[in-house]
Amino acid sequence: MSAFEPSFTIGIEEEYLLVDLETLDLVEAPDALMADCKAELEGQVSPEFLQCQIEIGTKVCANISEAHDDLRRLRTCVRDVAQKYGMAPIAASCHPSADYQRQHHTDNPRYHDLSRDLAGVARRMLICGQHVHVGIENDEARIDLLSQFPYFLPHLLALSGSSPYWKGEDTGLASYRLTVFDNLPRTGLPPVFSSWSEYERSIQMIIDSGAIKDTTKIWWDLRPSARFQTLENRICDVSPRMEDALTMAAITQCLMRMLWRLRKNNQRWRVYDRFLVGENRWRAQRYGVTEGLIDFGAAEVKSISDLVDEMLDLVGEDAEALGCLTELSRAKDIARDGSSAQRQRQVYQRARDAGEDDQAALRAVVDSLIGEFSEGL
């Protein structure tokens, strides 16, 4: 086994929803808004599937400090440009009250193909996520980590949950986004492959059959990137607060390094059955940080706070080597104070307690998400 150390570079992609500053309803991005953003951000911004969405992507960042600066620049630009058009971005995975049936997909060949291929499933895709790329340049190391990392995906989902509402109703879930996304094919936890060649053979079979054109149509929670030598964590809801988004990126980066470090020492994290990991995935989707996940070694449910403490102990030396101790430690705050899903419910309840009706309370939630988008900028 090669002792070559991956770069562990970071790239963060985020999808935002655009809302009208007066009504707080979703609004379609005019061509001029996209043109203004593209002029300032030089290829780091693009339309998304729906016309009310916009996507940004950081440059390849050597460390979390670079990612912080670039993400702040991107968020600031999108916010400031949107404001000129009477709009604001929110970084939540679902708009609290919007109806997907009133949205239109972007006029783009890729999105026309998606709409045709996915039929009715595509029409419900009023959701946003965060994707974190970590540079792992060795193919075999990348496929080895693909099988081990999924144990931690529910932890990240629990911490990032930001989609409790759908079409004006409290779903009872912390991440309703995932229930929508899981209706697509080729989603969910990735399969376990024994080698990079086995992965390539499996992928090539469905490409050669004509079922898909390329690996960009594979939407697992974790996947080898189609364009870069990275592993891409795709399970997280998008975080309203930039600092929380950076924490998800730091956890992803540190866990990747920890698993590589084990591999270098001829060790590895236990690969648990996808049935077991899937149960924790559901618990994270349903409860967020409130009800805990199953510790498979102890065969009992442990609180997210306890699990986060254990996880941070595991990756302490990796966080120090990567220079992201501050961002990593914020995971404790999220586990203790709650994720965005809880904050949204608290805003809604305060508005109802103050005498506001249901629609006004939901607008209060959107207003709070607009405010959180600018925190730290």
Image (tube, grey):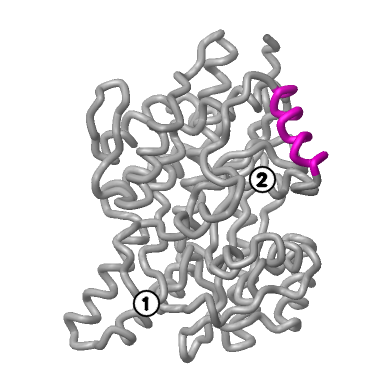
Q: Are marks 1 and 2 in contact (CB under 8 Å)?
A: no
Q: Which sits in the foreground, 41 or 96? A: 96
Given the image, on which type of amino acid does mark 2 rest? Answer: Ile
Amino acid type of the residue tagged 1 in the rendering: Gly
Residue, x 61% and y 54% (percent of image)?
A: 69
- Horizontal side, residue 247 vs residue 306: left or right: right
Q: Quadrant of the N terminus?
A: top right
Measuring from the top left, give residue 211's x and y in whole percent: 75, 47
Residue of label 1: 168
Counting every numbered tag in the picture gives 2
Write the residue at 67% across / 39% down: 62
How many C-alpha atoms fall within 10 Å of the one at disc 1: few (<14), some, or many (≥20)?
some
**Magenta segment main secondary structure:** helix
Q: Nearer the viewer, residue 173 or 244?
A: 173
Residue numbers of the magenta segment: 196-209
Helix, strand, or loop for circle 1?
loop
Give the residue pinned by disc 2: 218
Indicate whether 110 appears above or below 257.
below
Q: Is residue 83 magenta?
A: no
